[in-house]
Amino acid sequence: TFISKDSKGRLINFGADTLAGRMYTWVDQLGEFYVYSDKQAPTTKIINLESNMKNPWKIRIKDNLIPDGRVNDLYYSASVDGQWLLMDYDLKNDLLIFDDFGQLPSKPFEFQLLVTDDAGNKTVLKRQIK
């Protein structure tokens, strides 16, 4: 993948494609670009995942590279006991939020969150809710 640094020193991912054995990408800025191999999985941080279900569940998801150009943002999939769960994504704050507790089965159950970045690196978060 091709990367660049922003004014704060963060790595910006522009992705990469190949054509006739050469790498290329689409950029919307001038500057220095580097070839980079992303091997680091996204991170998850539980802000709130209380079993009493009085406050919305909040989980922060982040990646080491900031997506730009044609690069996809983080992909996430949440489930409870294997059943898909709809969570809201607050992109500005990197937060997944869930507050529709009425659709959950009775306790105990297992909550699972899978987060994948554009390079295919994965992180799985599992919690038993009792």
Image (spheres, rainbow, N blue to C red):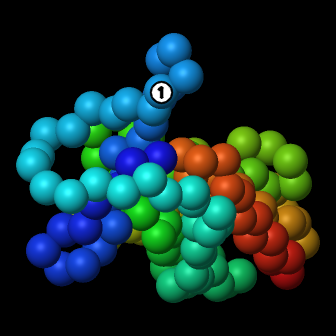
The vertical placement of 26 against 81, above or below, is above
Rendered view: 15 above or below 37: above
Residue situated in front as seen by the camera: 28 or 51: 28
Q: Is residue 64 left or right of residue 113?
A: left
> At 76% across and 64% down in the image, what residue appears?
124
Quadrant assignment, res 39: bottom right
**Quarter occupied by residue 83:** top right
Which residue does the image show at 34% across and 33% down from the upper left? 25
**Toward the viewer: 5 or 130?**
5
Residue 42 in view of the camera: yes
Direction from residue 10 to residue 109 in the image, left or right: right
> Would you name the residue on which mark 1 appears?
22
- Residue 102 vertical placement versus 107 (above, below): above
Position of residue 37 measured from the top left corner of the image (x, y, whole percent): 57, 57
Seen from the viewer's position, the closer of residues 104 and 117 is 117
Disc 1: CA contacts within 10 A as few (<14), some (14-19) or many (>=20) = few
- Tell me where residue 26 appears, x and y as whole percent: 27, 32
